[in-house]
Amino acid sequence: MPFDFLWGNNLSKLPPAIRKPMSVHLKVLIVDDEPQMRRILEPSLIAEGYAVVSAASGKEALDRFRASKPDVVVLDLGLPDMDGKDVIIAIRKTSSVPIIILSARENEAEKVSALDLGANDYVNKPAAIGELMARIRAALRHSGNAEALKTKLLAGPLAIDATTHVATLNGQTLKLTPKEFDLLLFLIRYAGRVITHHQILTTVWGPSHTEDAQYLRVLIRRLREKIEDDPADPKMIQTESGIGYRLLVAGETS
């Protein structure tokens, strides 16, 4: 089954799902035995502001569920050691956490069974990442988690609204390209933290561009020209040599 269906054209077109981006993230447990699927889902969820825990089997899923206490579970039904429906049953013995099934099983009886056992939603593979994010947001809203509705971020004089795709500096709207917006959004979500070149390239351009560091250098330069007082001596977007970049928050020094 092809896996590039999750990426679409670019992340600027994805519906936002910002989750406590500068403190404690809402946590998603991904349960899927296909490594490539996890490699696609993890950066996509991180880019949307979630913390991510992954498991490749039913037993591992239940162990990590107990240890990490996730806010939502994305669960494949076809696991190597048990049926995903058994995972639903085990979780429902102790928790009402939202469970979203992401599975290639299209049989109506499978869907009905999973929902009857306590799953909150059922998404067929292949599914667009935007649809999956919307389902996660809806599940969190229905669970009463107010943080699921956050869509605005602040970092010093910078503000960004992921719903309207508007970014401002000291109250003035910035004219950004879609890729510039994606990059700034990713930096501000992790303001104060070092983000590696690989993480940024995977999130902004996709997993097939992890070696295209020149794209990132050009975009960083253009973004600095739009937000820095002196782009040649940047105070906000700091370079961490050989590692990546860090957006400084108000009051922080490098």
Image (cartoon, helix red, strand yellow):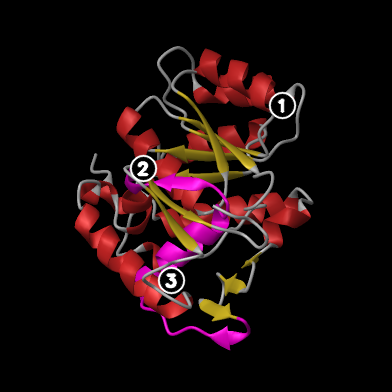
Q: Are marks 2 and 1 in contact (CB under 8 Å)?
A: no
Mark found first going from the N terminus, 2 or 1: 1
Number of the label disc, if any, that sits on residue 243: 2
Residue plotted at (53% across, 79% down): 166
| Secondary structure of residue under mark 3 | helix
Specify whether residue 53 is in view. Answer: yes
Residue 141 locus on image (x, y percent): 72, 55
Mark found first going from the N terminus, 3 or 2: 3
Mark found first going from the N terminus, 1 or 3: 1
Q: Which residue is mark 3?
A: 181
- Mark nearest the camera among 2 and 1 is 2
Residue 31 locus on image (x, y percent): 49, 29
Residue plotted at (24% across, 39% down): 1
Residue plotted at (23% across, 61% down): 215
Residue type highlighted by circle 2: Ile
Tell whether 184 sits left or right of 66.
left
Residue type highlighted by circle 3: Phe
Residue density around tag 2, few if under 14, some if 14–19, many if 20 or more, within 10 Å: few
Where 28 falls versus 16 (above or below)?
A: above
